[in-house]
Image: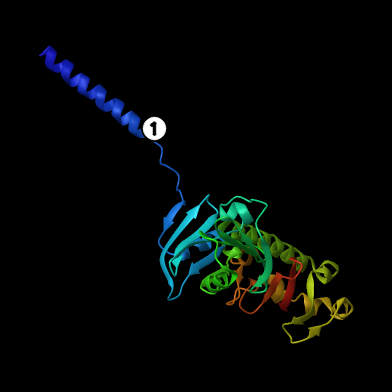
Amino acid sequence: MKRTVKVILLVFMVLSICAGCGSKKKEAPDDINGTVESPDSFIKLGMYIDAEGPEVSNCVYSISKDEIAEVSFVYNGLQCVFRASTVYSEFDLAAVDNTMTGDMLSTMINGNTATYYTLQPGRVVFFSDSKVNYSLYTYVTTTDAVLNDIINCLTFENHYNERPDVKKQTDEDAYAYAEKIMKVIKDEDVDTLSTMINYPEQLGSGQSISNEEELFKVPKEELFTEYLKGAMNQESLDNLRKTDDGSEYIMGTNYRNVHFRKNSKGEYKITRINN
């Protein structure tokens, strides 16, 4: 009987220890590196890249270093790698060494300055837009004409604003600006409002305001209507939204609202007041 009890206690202790080990086990963090199903997975990195055409085959899509999108493919029997990143550039992006002895040729790709660099063996093409850096690497030293043909098979799109970190920061900045709009309208602060407008401005009445001088001539009760002030509240902040084309933010109701967006300098400005 005593032996049976001891066995039972021993089994119970083992189970307790195992249960304890299980409770301490930590889930491995999500790892975005490795092969992915399609180039759609690159959008979270801020770009979309692909290689397509009758002479393109064996496309493999992958992500490396958390920030590099990669399309490995074969063009007419030639092994190639097309990469893109918003963080890495040039030789770090191409994953090749700068020999400092390669021939360099400057050209343009879709309006972007590009560089053709010669390795032994291999060729690299570097180019960038405002946010995304790209590199095309061929494993053999091919001609400029062949490089041009390969480039014509490449698809590359800038999706920088769709990166989660960029979207988060953009939304936070827009929310802060909307809070400023709400305060200015509640306080009927024409002075501050005059600096926030992207002239010419249009009011809900159809009146066009070309400059600050014209804005100051509008009676406050007509500019800061009770309807507009009533629409500037916490609910409007919580429901801050974008226009259908995504070009502007809207704060307020469907009828009484304020539109704003970033200008060419990257500053938020009010584009319309439906008062």
- Which is nearer the eye, 47 or 1? 47
The residue furthest left is 1
In the displayed structure, would residue 275 be above or below residue 124?
below
Say which quarter of the image contains residue 186.
Answer: bottom right
Report the residue at 66% width, 60% height from top. 103
Report the residue at 87% width, 81% height from top. 214
Considering the numbered disc 1 on the image, is that residue within a helix, a strand or a loop?
A: helix
Left or right: 101 in relation to 159: right
The residue furthest right is 213
Left or right: 232 in relation to 42: right
- Which is nearer the eye, 121 or 148? 121
The residue furthest top is 2
Percent of width and height locating residue 90: 63, 56
**Dot 1, crowdedness within 10 Å: few (<14), some or many (≥20)?**
few
**In the rendered view of the protein, which quadrant contains the C terminus?**
bottom right
Percent of width and height locating residue 255: 64, 79
Which amino acid type is marked by label 1?
Lys
Looking at the rendered structure, the number of numbered marks drawn on it comes to 1
Q: Does residue 1 appear anywhere in the picture? A: yes
- Which is nearer the eye, 71 or 245? 71
Say which quarter of the image contains residue 108.
Answer: bottom right
In this picture the colour scheme is rainbow
**In the rendered view of the protein, which quadrant contains the N terminus?**
top left
Q: Does residue 275 appear anywhere in the picture? A: no
In the displayed structure, would residue 55 be above or below residue 140?
below
Pointer 1 residue? 24
Percent of width and height locating residue 215: 85, 78
Percent of width and height locating residue 273: 72, 77
